[in-house]
Image (cartoon, rainbow, N blue to C red):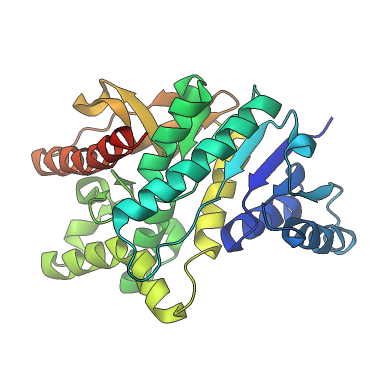
Amino acid sequence: MRSKVTVVGAGNVGATTAQRIVDKALADVVLVDVVEGLPQGKALDMAESTPVSGADVSVTGTNGYEESANSDVVVITAGIARRPGMSRDDLLLTNMKIMTAVVTEVVKHSPDAILVIVSNPLDAMVQKAYEVSGFPKERVVGMAGILDTSRFRTFLAEELNVSVTNVSAYVLGGHGDSMVPLLGTTTVGGKPVTEMIEAGRLEEIVQRTRDGGAEIVNLLKTGSAFYAPSAAAVQMVEAILGDRKEILPCAAYLEGEYGMSGLYAGVPVKLGSGGVEEIIEIDLTDAESTALKASADSVQELIDVMAANQ
């Protein structure tokens, strides 16, 4: 029996996530969106591509959740993008309501699923999904660190003119200005990157990584990134469905790890069929520890705003 993955949100990120899952023939896919016709049309288009790709999976588009019943994994991309004149808190509270409604339906129909949260602001949304779902912490995980790390590796590979596969790096912390690239453990072909790129230039690359999403928004004018985010989400889905025990930077619920408790933060985790099967603690420099704590404090501010507006 094939696995089943539901993707909630048929916008660019959600639809591309669904398409990648179909192309890899990882699972049957259900695409859910509130816009009438949108998930149905995109699902039909994907289904009609399977004879070409050879992917023997089914693709269903729907405006409800009945078809998503008994999903193994549910990827949630639903939410609005920040609009001109909209404050960060406005975005937070609007997407909080959307996340609450979505997770309530998902839990009702797929009580044993693992939730992969992609919606922004990511760290706050995965916290909300955890609270609403009532699921064990292992079965609610956020995607951001893989995306941030991929951007960092891309820029380093370009700078040094090497294959991206030769760059080993982790970006931890929140998804945003407070993310923490671990320069001390970043290597290229096994050699510390700090010995290959001078400090000033390396800091410019770190800043470009932090601004990675905004750079794409500024170029597109009317949209935001979706190819890399969807690839990152699918890497998580593949690790879960394949029980790969892959160590990836994801937003996980901390209970004492890295000196933090009671909130989600981007850290290396072992991802397998049980979801977050282990949190990997890396030795950090004092500066990295301080930066990670500051990143967690930024996430806590968002959590406090949500709590005050329940």
Residue at 32% across, 69% down: 85
Vertical relation: 34 (above or below) 262: below
- Where is residue 242 drawn, in percent x and y? 65, 34
- Where is residue 12 drawn, in percent x and y? 59, 63
- Where is residue 70 drawn, in percent x and y? 74, 28
Taking the image as drawn, is residue 267 in sight? yes
Taking the image as drawn, is residue 241 in sight? no
Q: Nearer the viewer, residue 236 or 63?
A: 63
User: Which quadrant, please, contains the C terminus?
Assistant: top left
Vertical relation: 173 (above or below) 227: above
Q: Nearer the viewer, residue 236 or 110?
A: 110
Place residue 290 in its image quadrant: top left
* Left or right relative to 118: residue 25: right
Q: Residue furthest right?
A: 51
- Where is residue 164 drawn, in percent x and y? 44, 62
Place residue 91 in its image quadrant: bottom left
Q: How many marks?
A: 0
Residue at 35% across, 73% down: 215
User: Which quadrant, please, contains the N terminus?
Assistant: top right
Residue at 17% across, 37% down: 293
Place residue 303 in its image quadrant: top left
